[in-house]
Amino acid sequence: MSFDNPRLLAFLFILLPLMLVMFLRYLKLRKGADLFAASAPKGERDALVREYRWRMICSDCFFLLFLGFIITALAGPRWGVELTADFRRGLDVVLTLDVSRSMDVQDCPPVPGLKGRSSRIQRGLMIARDLSLELDGIRLGTAVGKGRGVLTVPLTYDSEAVLNFLDSLGAFTVTGRGTNLESLIDAAAGAFKDSMPGRRCILLFSDGEILSGSLEAALVRARDRGIVLCAVGLGSDEGGPVPAGPAPGTPGSSGFLLSEDGSAVISSRQSEFLKNTAERSGGIYVDGNRNDAAALVAEYFSSLSADSGFSGRTREPKARWHLFVLAALVSLGVSRLLGFRWRRKKAAMLGALVCFLSLTGSSCSRIQGKLLIMEGNFYNSRGLYTDAISSYLKALDYDDAAPYAEYGLGSAYFALEEGQAALERYAEAEKNLAAPGAEDHPELRYRIQYNSGIIHFEKGEYQRAAEAFRRALEIDGSRIEAKRNLELSLLTLSRASRSEPPSSPGKSESAGAGTGPAAPVLFDYLRLREQEQWKSKAWAEEDVSSGPDY
């Protein structure tokens, strides 16, 4: 047997002083029982005293069992083996650029559009641009650092945002004094959220020279969070003189840095240092002077992200906390039942207890399914999406909980920015609700349609979004947020139709549905329905909208 939170078992020691308190309480109440039984007939007095004492002892024992079972359940006991779905989200990468003054040294192969040798920062920006164009389905972010690291572009699927930043970085002289790779790595690591499962990688573009900070300390912190460091070494092992201002050949150039003896300061690439650093963290090192540097890094990242989604099932100890919760409820029930007099109702009490246990056993499967849904909702609300997905998948085995499990899976996938997978799960939940004999769940059906509309709108499928919001209003026409989103979808469709010529070849046949003259008619219809609904009621303040349900 193992426990998820074994430290909570220490609370079991609280039972020891409780046992002492209950023993003292028993000694006190025993005298009261003797006085109570003194008024009974002489022939029943001894039997009545024994009964009361026995019931006091048993009641206290079952209450102690109740506390012990609850504490054990909170500790998360596990035994046995079960198959659990393993979900991976893919790969997140932060492009981290060292923009210290040594990165202006011109000892790199030329880049397209420039004559002669290029600076290290120019070479790094070229590799970063090529890499951003090659990577697909991977979230990218950027961080830069000289004296202090700064996260400039948070993780995003929008590669255009990353490219625009890299272009703007290359258009100005941004290098400065000092090299603090520790601060730079910490800033890049800040882009990763612990609630988002998946592989994490920092790609460092640097010459490896450090003037302040401890890179080793930053790597230890990153490794504890599951972050891998890869490095692209820029410059040459022979090195070159460090410009005192902007790179030579640019406006404002003022020569090179000089040492105390009057000679030029030479900066060289620390290849072995970067290679050893990357290998210790589980990453790779690539020579930035290679023409295929971007292709090598892209191939490595593609191999890491190839397992996005379900990677199979793993064997894990099975959670058994619900058994202890059930035992705690039974112990508490017995403890309370012993407080009633059984002399004339003993058979009735025993029958009630048997019925309770039988009902509990017969509905165990239904309770288990609902408990799994509650467990998944708990993990989902706290951003622990892998655990939430695992709980929802287990709940699929219970017919009553299957629609809610499918909806929960859709919500978790949408939070992981897997919109298409979320739509598929919403569709499965709708099929389960439409099955013969299925119970009607109007709130769940509304949320399925509403959240589907949100996803379609974010994907730019405004016609489908409008249809989903319209179906949501057919289920519950009082929802203000659905009305607003329906109107927004139709207005967006109307603007798109006005901005494109009628004979546009890329326009689908259904793109004009709900637009043009029909859209204002629909808006007027909705307003009339609202007015008719409110004519017979006193005006009341509108409820605050809960917003999107995702």
Image (cartoon, rainbow, N blue to C red):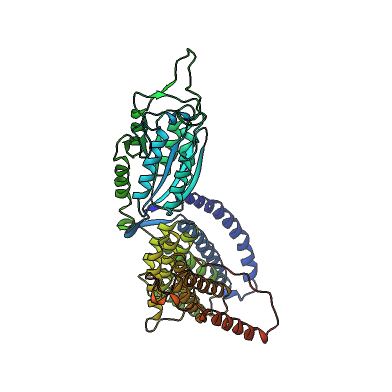
Along the line of sight, which residue is nearer the eye, 343 or 236?
236
Along the line of sight, which residue is nearer the eye, 387 or 431?
431
The furthest residue to the right: 538
Residue at image position (70%, 80%) is 539
> Could you tell me if residue 4 is visible in this image?
no
Q: Which quarter of the figure has residue 36?
A: bottom right
Along the line of sight, which residue is nearer the eye, 514 or 386?
514
For residue 518, side relative to residue 507 (left or right): right
Instruction: Give the mark count.
Output: 0
Q: In this rendering, is residue 150 above or below 456?
A: above
For residue 53, side relative to residue 182 (left or right): right
Q: Which quarter of the figure has residue 111?
A: top left
Residue at image position (49%, 35%) is 173
Q: Which quarter of the figure has residue 413?
A: bottom left
Q: Residue 192, position in %: x, y?
A: 45, 48
Q: Residue 399, position in %: x, y?
A: 37, 75
Q: In this rendering, is residue 496 above or below 86?
A: below
Along the line of sight, which residue is nearer the eye, 104 or 24?
104
> Could you tell me if residue 257 is visible in this image?
yes
Q: In this rendering, is residue 162 above or below 350?
A: above
Q: Residue 298, position in %: x, y?
A: 32, 46
Q: Residue 383, position in %: x, y?
A: 47, 57
